[in-house]
Image: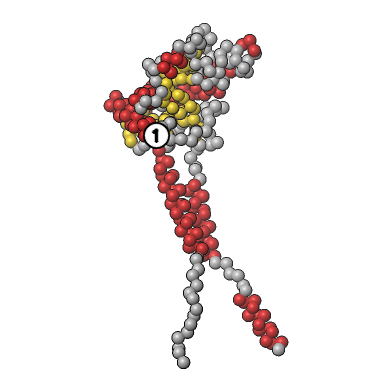
């Protein structure tokens, strides 16, 4: 009787053992690995500046320049001296020594900007046109655009000088 | 005595493991294909302004114009949707026509401009001009242009 009970319990233990199928698991793990490798974007992320280009000779473009406030023209020219370019703000606003200085100037003279209250000359929707020489590198054009946009101005346009 | 055994009704079982295998293979396939489609972004050394005031691009249709860099800040041409456009006036006309078709087929299309940071502005400006002309021909009031910059891995 005791022998019969022992044999039954041994048979019961064998039938209830749970086996892990390694081959299938490796299949799935490798598939997951491949999936995440493919899905991961290793290229550096890109961001954008929004720039609306209204039609020439149509209402919007004309409206931009026909505003009571004349657009602020920023000339960007190539220079042989340091830092390799010159900036000029037309209208007697001076010549910032570099793009960082331009950004500080623009931020300080925006109404509600970083400057003192009586130094605010331009609203954030004041039209600003960057007139760059064709030989100026794209990096500097974008840097100038970035400085003006970063100072809080919304209506910035690019033109060839 | 009959020798035929009655086994009862056949049991139908779904094997999950092969199904998961196949489903994952399909997922990987579609992800890989979508990555290939995204090859409209050529490898360019984009400007990286710091601190950057740029933002993440909005969702929506886009046409990516790549300005291919040439020697000494020049450009070898423009690439859009896998097509090359020369920097001469004929290429400019073809680029305008191509962008016009894209604008007409996709309302609200953004035109992303990607150029190497060493490329001269004089070689990028024609793309802006083409975008503006194409928008005019497509009946849009303004071309929605976006300047792509390197976010520095963010």
Is A104 situated above or below B44? above
Residue extending furthest toward the right: A2
Residue A141 visible from this viewpoint = yes
Residue extending furthest toward the left: B90
Is B45 situated above or below A100? below
Residue B77 x %, y %: 34, 30
Residue A124 x %, y %: 55, 18
B59 sits to left or right of A135: right
Q: Which residue is mark 1?
A: B106
Residue B15 x %, y %: 50, 65
Display coloring: secondary structure
Tally the numbered discs.
1
Residue A97 visible from this viewpoint = no
Q: Looking at the image, which is closer to me, A104 or B60?
A: B60
Dividing the picture into quadrants, the one containing residue B84 is top left
Task: Identify which residue is drawn at 42% across, 37% down.
Answer: B41
Task: Identify which residue is drawn at 39% across, 34% down.
Answer: B106
Asked which secondary structure carries label 1, the reply is loop
Q: Quadrant of the C terminus of chain B?
A: top right
Task: Identify which residue is drawn at 41% across, 44% down.
Answer: B36
Residue B45 x %, y %: 45, 32
Mark 1: give few (<14), some (14-19) or many (20+) Cα within 10 Å. Answer: some
Is B36 situated above or below A124? below
A130 sits to left or right of B89: right
Task: Identify which residue is drawn at 49% across, 42% down.
Answer: A42
Residue extending furthest toward the top: A92
A122 sits to left or right of B113: right
- Tell which subunit mark 1 falls on: B
């Amino acid at each position: 009787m005791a022998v019969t009970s022992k044999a039954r319990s041994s048979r019961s233990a064998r039938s209830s053992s749970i086996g892990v199928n390694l081959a299938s698991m490796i299949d799935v793990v490798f598939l997951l690995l491949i999936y995440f490798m493919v899905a991961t974007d290793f290229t550096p992320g890109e961001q954008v500046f929004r720039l609306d280009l209204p039609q020439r000779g149509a209402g919007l473009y004309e409206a931009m320049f026909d505003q009571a406030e004349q657009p602020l023209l920023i000339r960007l020219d190539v220079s042989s001296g340091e830092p390799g370019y010159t900036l000029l703000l037309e209208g007697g606003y001076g010549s910032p020594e570099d793009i960082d200085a331009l950004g500080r100037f623009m931020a300080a003279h925006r109404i509600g900007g970083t400057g003192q209250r009586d130094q605010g000359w331009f609203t954030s929707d004041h039209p600003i046109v960057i007139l760059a020489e064709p030989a100026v590198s794209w990096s500097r054009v974008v840097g100038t655009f970035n400085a003006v946009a970063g100072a809080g101005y919304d209506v910035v346009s690019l033109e060839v000088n | 005595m009959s020798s035929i055994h009655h086994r009862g009704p056949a049991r139908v079982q779904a094997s999950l493991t092969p199904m998961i295998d196949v489903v994952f293979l399909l997922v990987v396939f579609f992800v890989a294909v979508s990555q290939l489609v995204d090859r409209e972004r050529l490898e360019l050394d984009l400007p990286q302004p710091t601190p950057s005031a740029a933002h993440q691009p909005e969702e929506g249709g886009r046409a990516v114009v790549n300005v291919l860099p040439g020697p000494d800040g020049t450009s070898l041409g423009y690439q859009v949707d896998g097509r090359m456009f020369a920097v001469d006036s004929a290429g400019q006309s073809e680029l305008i026509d191509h962008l016009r078709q894209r604008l007409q087929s996709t309302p609200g299309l953004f035109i992303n401009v990607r150029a190497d940071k060493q490329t001269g502005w004089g070689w990028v400006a024609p793309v802006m001009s083409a975008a503006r002309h194409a928008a005019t021909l497509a009946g849009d009031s303004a071309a929605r242009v976006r300047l792509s910059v390197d976010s520095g891995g963010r």
